[in-house]
Amino acid sequence: MPTESPAIEVRGLTKRYGKKVAVDDLSFDVHPGQVTGFLGPNGAGKSTTLRMILGLDTPTSGSALIHGRSFATHRRPLFEVGALLDPKSFHPGRSARNHLSALALANGIERARVDVVLDLVGLMSVATKRAGGFSLGMGQRLGIASALLGDPDVLILDEPINGLDPDGILWVRNLLRSLAGEGRTVLVSSHLMSEMALTADHLVVIGAGRLLADDTVEGFVAASGRNSVRVRSPQSEQLALLLTNQGASATVPALDELEVTGVSTDQIGDVAAAHGITIHELSLQQVTLEEAFMELTHDSVEYRTDTPTINPTYLNLLNEESVAS
Amino acid sequence: MTDVTVSSFTPTTSEASVVMDLVRSEWAKFRTVRSTYWSLIAAVIAMIGLGALISATQSGNHFSFDPVSISLSGVLLAQLAIGVLGVLFVTSEYSTGMIRTTFSAAPQRRIVIASKAAVFAVVALVLGTLTSLVTFLVGQAAMGHLGVSLTSPGAVRSVVGVGLYLGLLAVFAVGLGTILRSTAGAIATLFGLILVLPAIAQALPASIQNSIDKYLPSNAGQAIFHSIRDTSTLSPWVGLGVFALYAGATLVGGLIMVGRRDV
């Protein structure tokens, strides 16, 4: 567990647009030395939160501090906070090198640093090309270069792997891990849980603007209510009865098989031994991070396809047809 | 490339102030896009070309024949290029998303916009004055025996005045771009104010027109390059002062808004 004080402190952060609440009383800390994944379905308020941390949007209430100060009070912020907000947040007519040079000048960063970061992100060969011709992935790389320009302690990256090819994704993952390994604070948003499972140490999950989870990756999965134990036993019916008496619930997916929730593998083993029940298999069915995430955010997803949107009249017609046939 | 080392850099911060850093940054941005050069070339060609063309066709028998301002009439076209460039200097950052990168490198938003205004105003002032001088000389030569020299009354003031007018117009355009953020909206508003408004005023009854017309932004500002005065215009420096108020108020409005709004 991190012992250092948090680099980013978000306290009661709220953003309303008219009646719509984009971010709702959000509080969490981001610690140095680890990658913190900022997760949520599309429209959960991730980008709005990051914009408020970066002082671009003013919170309706609450605060976001970086190193104990609001972003707007940093005089040369690139030395302390590097940010990537959009993959295409540059002028398309300007070359990558000129884009970075202008940013470097704004913070009094020595010009030699521009080529260092261009080399670092692999854009050296296209440094003089107009950035408007860049692919989405190259745009992300240029954005990452600008975030690294001032060699900051804190990195805030909004969906940095969008548009990257597998090589690029691996590169970003290694980059983020090594930045965190150097003791930096890395806050990276994504709507892809599978990616965060590989990159992040800690997760902050939001849905509909509210905090849903703030936990380590392992803790997040363990806390998911859907973890179950698979048991195979020739006396499965007897075992099911004994376990349900102990407050567990059990389903029977197949003959001689049980799926038990509410008790640990140890408890099941003990119960079986006490009653002389033969066990052929006893295994913890841990949900994947993806499943835990889906479970957690299911209710807060704004745009969803699995809810029936067919109107009742149409359903009635279908029923009548099926009756007729 | 899976091995990434980032820690080999020690930041060296120059001693110059944040303001100078931002001015340098905006100057670098200004110099590194093509639209800057196209617009400035268009302004220069329009000013010299139109000035020469109009000068060459003068017969000189108009009762208020003003050879100085006639030679400089290309500024009416050049101002559009300057205005568009000033608007784009700001609105292109909004339309591309660059503005978020800019403001996350420099949270001092008002200084950023003020730096933009300063950089472009100086460019417009210097380029405008130099081009105006060339335009004047070319125009007077094209007028033949009707031409006058720089020593004629109001000539130097008019030549320098074109530069001052374009410098203030640059401030005006940056301010409008900041307030409106959209390229189309800001350009339409700018053209409306400097071209359409005077035309509308022409349609008003003479009594109202006389009291309004000379205070309109472009009419007031352009008084500085009329060497012969008539009662329908403000005196040169008063006119320029009125135009400076418009430009300054617009920029201040932009500065106030950019500090308050979400980006």
Image (cartoon, rainbow, N blue to C red):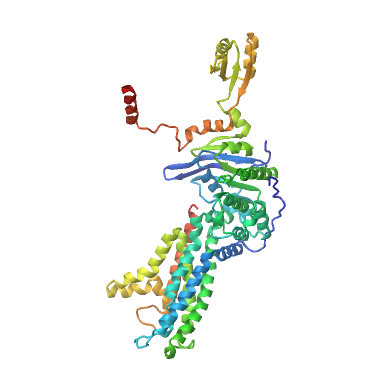
Residue at 54% over, 52% down = A88
The answer to whether A5 appears left or right of A132 in the picture is right
Residue A85 x %, y %: 55, 49
Residue B148 x %, y %: 45, 88
**Residue situated in front as seen by the camera: A200 or A51:** A200
Instruction: Say if B200 sits above or below A168 in the image.
Output: below
Residue at 54% over, 63% down = B33
Q: Quadrant of the C terminus of chain A?
A: top left
The mark total stands at 0
Residue A109 x %, y %: 65, 59
Instruction: Say if A230 sits above or below B81 in the image.
Output: above
**Residue situated in front as seen by the camera: B178 or B239:** B178
Residue at 59% over, 43% down = A188
Residue B97 visible to the viewer? yes
In the rendered image, the residue lying farthest to the top is: A276
Residue B115 x %, y %: 55, 64
In the rendered image, the residue lying farthest to the bottom is: B145
